[in-house]
């Protein structure tokens, strides 16, 4: 049976959800129908644009630009501040509705998810019929709209959902790639950041089709492993699967939005050290170890991606989590500035569960584990007595 993957993306989520909430509370004007944005502080006009209406887009306003620039382009612009607590509630309602179709859902952000429709596709006349049923149900029930992309893999489903908006369903199957995707500008390709696009333009590669038909060795020569990934994406190649988990199997993780975009690996390492310590502490408190670690990135232009790996043995050790996240980051980073970083763990097992070790692994591992246990116990006692900031690893100390 051929895979059927949906990508569901809320249209201008923050703005749509704010508009729906305002209308519910008696507002006379729908933010979606006027030049409006979500972002920053209303009084000082600081911050960046997090979401924009279609009318605002016509003024050349784009997501991620400073709010003050947006007001220069449109002096009559209406701005509302973000309400992340409300957004989480709207997101939870959306996921609850989608689980009425299938539990095989991978939520990748508050406003988008992948859905593996393969096993239930035969319950509907066609995937398109199912997607329209789903899309229209969301609009009628909750008052906001989504785009749904349909394909054989996650990459093409996401590309399809980014076609004409809002409130649309699009397909992008492999056989449709040359007609629907190849004519698009290179910047429209998922994970093709500004620096990658500029490097490829110097090679006279301007469209996705140009990249798809370029010599892979030449692309790798200029952009290394990231270039190979972009070349595969341009050809519709994506081997990732929808990573859904039942509620009881959910992992433990943490992420942070950076005060300023990180542009160097050294900056990123410091953030991962803090995240790894937080996730490791939560795993140990829950009496759990993780068999899988994933690293997530949100870039300065709000494009998100994650990269994961299976561990050779389950762990809740900070250092292992840190080393793994750093390795995954190096493998996946496009060299674009980073806005958010996260570490997630999955496939949890009881920390007391015995491990299957070889006789060659046993002694060094036991010694290392005992050393870490003693260190963690000592640090815990100091923190309990003097506070959380009383002791920390040198790698977490802020540079002057």
Image (cartoon, rainbow, N blue to C red):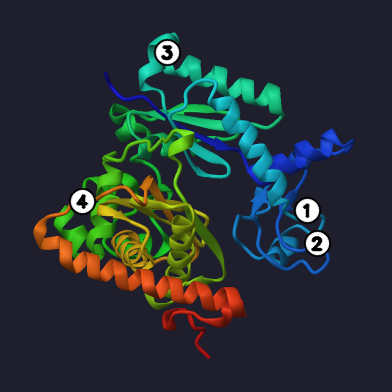
Work out which residue is located at the far bottom of the displayed protein and give it. 400
- Which residue is at a point 66% across and 58% down the rendered structure image? 49
- Asked if the residue at tag 1 contacts the one at tag 2, i.e. Cβ–Cβ closer than 8 Å, the answer is yes
Q: Which badge, 1 or 3, comes first in the chain's sequence?
A: 1
The disc placed on residue 126 is 3
Quarter-wise, where is residue 242 in the image? top left
Residue placed under numbered mark 1 in the picture: 80
Residue placed under numbered mark 4 in the picture: 214
- Asked if the residue at tag 4 contacts the one at tag 1, i.e. Cβ–Cβ closer than 8 Å, the answer is no
Residue placed under numbered mark 2 in the picture: 42
Alpha-carbon span between mark 2 and mark 3: 46 Å
Q: Tell me if I can see residue 307 in this picture.
A: no
- Asked if the residue at tag 4 contacts the one at tag 3, i.e. Cβ–Cβ closer than 8 Å, the answer is no
- Element type at marker 4? loop
Q: Tell me if I can see residue 97 in this picture.
A: yes
Alpha-carbon span between mark 3 and mark 4: 35 Å
- Which residue is at a point 34% across and 66% down the rendered structure image? 326
Q: Which badge, 2 or 1, comes first in the chain's sequence?
A: 2
Q: Residues within 10 Å of mark 2 (few under 14, many from 20)?
A: some
Alpha-carbon span between mark 1 and mark 4: 45 Å
């Amino acid at each position: 049976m051929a895979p059927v993957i949906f990508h569901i993306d809320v249209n201008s989520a923050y703005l749509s959800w704010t508009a729906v909430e305002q209308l519910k509370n008696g507002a006379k004007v729908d933010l979606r129908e006027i030049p409006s944005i979500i972002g920053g502080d209303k009084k000082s006009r600081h911050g960046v644009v997090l979401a924009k209406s279609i009318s605002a887009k016509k003024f050349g306003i784009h997501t991620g630009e400073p709010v003050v620039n947006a007001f220069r382009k449109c002096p009559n612009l209406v701005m509302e501040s973000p309400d992340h607590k409300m957004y989480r509630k709207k997101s939870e309602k959306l996921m609850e509705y989608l689980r009425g179709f299938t539990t095989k859902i991978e939520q990748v952000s508050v406003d988008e998810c992948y859905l593996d429709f393969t096993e239930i596709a035969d319950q509907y006349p066609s995937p398109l019929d199912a997607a329209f049923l789903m899309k229209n149900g969301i609009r009628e029930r909750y008052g906001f709209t989504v785009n749904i992309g349909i394909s054989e893999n996650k990459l093409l489903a996401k590309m399809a959902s980014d076609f004409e908006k809002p409130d649309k369903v699009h397909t992008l199957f492999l056989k449709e790639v040359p007609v629907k995707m190849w004519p698009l500008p290179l910047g429209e390709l998922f994970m093709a950041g500004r620096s990658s696009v500029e490097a490829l333009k110097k090679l006279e590669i301007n469209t996705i089709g140009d990249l798809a038909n370029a010599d892979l060795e030449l692309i790798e020569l200029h952009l290394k492993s990231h270039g190979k990934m972009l070349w595969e994406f341009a050809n519709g190649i994506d081997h990732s699967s929808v990573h859904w988990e039942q509620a009881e199997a959910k992992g433990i993780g943490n992420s942070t939005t950076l005060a300023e975009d990180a542009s160097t690996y050294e900056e990123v390492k410091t953030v991962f050290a803090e995240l790894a310590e937080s996730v490791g502490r939560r795993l140990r408190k829950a009496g759990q170890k993780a068999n899988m670690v994933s690293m997530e990135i949100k870039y300065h232009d709000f494009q998100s991606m994650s990269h994961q790996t299976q561990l050779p043995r389950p762990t809740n050790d900070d250092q292992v989590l840190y080393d793994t996240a750093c390795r995954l980051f190096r493998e996946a980073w496009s060299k674009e500035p980073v806005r958010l970083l996260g570490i997630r763990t999955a496939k949890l097992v009881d920390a007391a569960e015995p491990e299957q070790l070889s006789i060659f692994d046993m002694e060094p591992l036991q010694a290392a584990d005992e050393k870490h246990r003693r260190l963690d116990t000592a640090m815990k006692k100091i923190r309990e007595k003097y506070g959380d900031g009383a002791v920390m690893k040198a790698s977490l100390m802020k540079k002057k």
